[in-house]
Image (cartoon, rainbow, N blue to C red):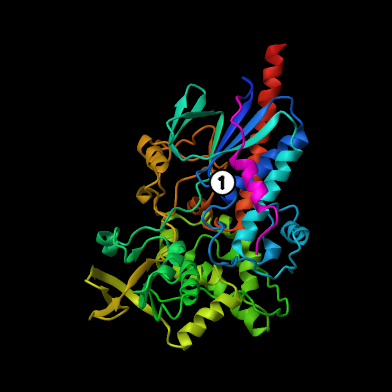
Amino acid sequence: MQARNHGAVSAAFSTAPETRPSTHAWQVAIVGAGFSGTALAIQLLKEATSAASARPMRITLVDPRPEIGAGVAYATRDYPYPLNVAAGQMSVDGSRPGDFLDYLKTQGIHAVPGDYLPRQVYGDYLRTRLAEARAAAPSNVECVHRRASAWQLRRNDDRWLLWLDDGTPLTADDVALALGNPPPAIPPELAHLAHSRRYISDPWSIGTLANQEDIGSVLLVGSGLTMIDAALRLAALRPRVRHIHVLSRHGLMPESQAATALPAIKPDVASALEAARGSTRRLVRAFRSLTATVGKAGGDWREVLGLARGQLAAQWRALDQTQRARFLRHARSSWEVNRHRVPAGPLGAVRSLARAGVLEVHAGRLEEASELEDSMEVIWRPRGATRTRAWLVDRIINCTGPERRAGRVADPLVQSLLSSGTIRADALSLGIDIADDGRPISRDGAPVDRLYYLGPWLRARDWEATAVPELREHAAGLARSLARRHLVESVQENLQEK
């Protein structure tokens, strides 16, 4: 399923001219044009339109992909991977909750708020809204797509120099890092197989297996959201793929989104969480009590997590490092499968594969893997066991999810920023340290002026920071903050000229 104007909108940005801005133009560079970067550009354009400032502005989205708004999540692929969030919650603008549904109507796509659309349709939606915001902006405001990768960021007097992979610099007054999710880390036990054709580091490239004949059994390392997508894609290759092993520490698959509407039971979540504030143990008990109460009353336990959503960042910030580490050690796996759910249809399909004996989920630890002449031998240890077991598989696919540890991300820009001390990894390896206003905190503990971060590494500060409802609010808040600065500087510049 495709939106009709996909090609035209994509081309409009991939071929945007690199005109030289006015010497007094305010220049904003957004590194990354997935959801976060695109949402920020849209909000900045809207702020500029409403303010109608006389000072020129240039927004440059820096991303090597040809598609704006795609990123890893919403790229056009060879399989219609569904969104994990219902259409009614996917508006890019929080002030217009039904905006995505309105867009679907214009494309002749019938959908209701509870539907789960193909991800590439959402990418088309983001491109369309960006094109509309760009067209509505004043003539002295432009937004262009620079197809390049950013390798290094350096301060040059009162401005930033962003060096791109083509060797050219991009000058900016403000820089927003919207880097998205990095690729999954290679498990240490598989590092020596990184260049083997039997090891697949990119789970979105599974479709290439359709052209190969020696696929019998496959091991998926990881049992979360990425595994669900990989299993569905592999199932489409049957009978070429005959058996799928899934291995993770706890052997837990994501829970299902609600399949049917249940009575609305709304307990006093705010009071219960406030009473548990500052303690991981009390918070876990509060959630268990609330979900049990709702379930017994015939309601949907998922509603508790929805009602708690607006408080999660404050609750996380109220935990000290010891309490946060305790949560990550004891409650993280349970939280992930309950909070980050999948639509009932895809999860039901995967469970059907398990009932048919095609897919097996195992709880345990990968010990080692070695490449044989015509297969791979995998040694693993079941959870709680002392003896190891072995499999022979034809492919190993990394489904462990995005790398969370900034220090292990291979991106040259990230490594450059860490090396220079411009950003620093957080103490619990969840992302990077971010100030309340979105500025990264440097190695010396001070927020970096005129540099901002927007994306999943905000989990170090807020815990929940990977879904559209949270990220769109961060984008809108950052756009308002930047617009205020732009207005103040415009006034000051006009006064100086007078």
Q: Nearer the viewer, residue 134 or 416?
A: 134
| Quadrant of the rendered image containing residue 74 | bottom right
462 lies above or below 17: below
The secondary structure type at the circle numbered 1 is loop
Rendered-image quadrant of the N terminus:
bottom right
The answer to whether residue 82 is left or right of residue 222 is right
Q: Residue furthest bottom?
A: 356
Tell me which amino acid carries mark 1: Ala
- Residue 331 appearing in the image: no
State yes or no: residue 9 in magenta: yes
Counting from the top left corner in percent of width and height, residue 232 is at: 50, 74
| Quadrant of the rendered image containing residue 387 | bottom left
Q: Nearer the viewer, residue 493 or 184?
A: 184
Rendered-image quadrant of the C terminus:
top right
* Neighbours of disc 1 within 10 Å: few (<14), some (14-19), many (20+): many
Counting from the top left corner in percent of width and height, residue 482 is at: 63, 35
Residue plotted at (64% across, 24% down): 25
49 lies above or below 22: below
The residue where tag 1 is placed is 33
The answer to whether residue 400 is left or right of residue 484 is left
- Start-end of magenta stretch: 1-20
The answer to whether residue 125 is left or right of residue 71 is right
Q: How many labels sit on residues?
A: 1
Counting from the top left corner in percent of width and height, residue 20 is at: 60, 24
The answer to whether residue 15 is left or right of residue 53 is left
Counting from the top left corner in percent of width and height, residue 209 is at: 41, 68
Residue plotted at (55% across, 61% down): 277
- Residue 183 appearing in the image: yes
116 lies above or below 434: below
Q: Nearer the viewer, residue 1 or 160?
A: 1
241 lies above or below 424: below
Q: Nearer the viewer, residue 234 or 161?
A: 234
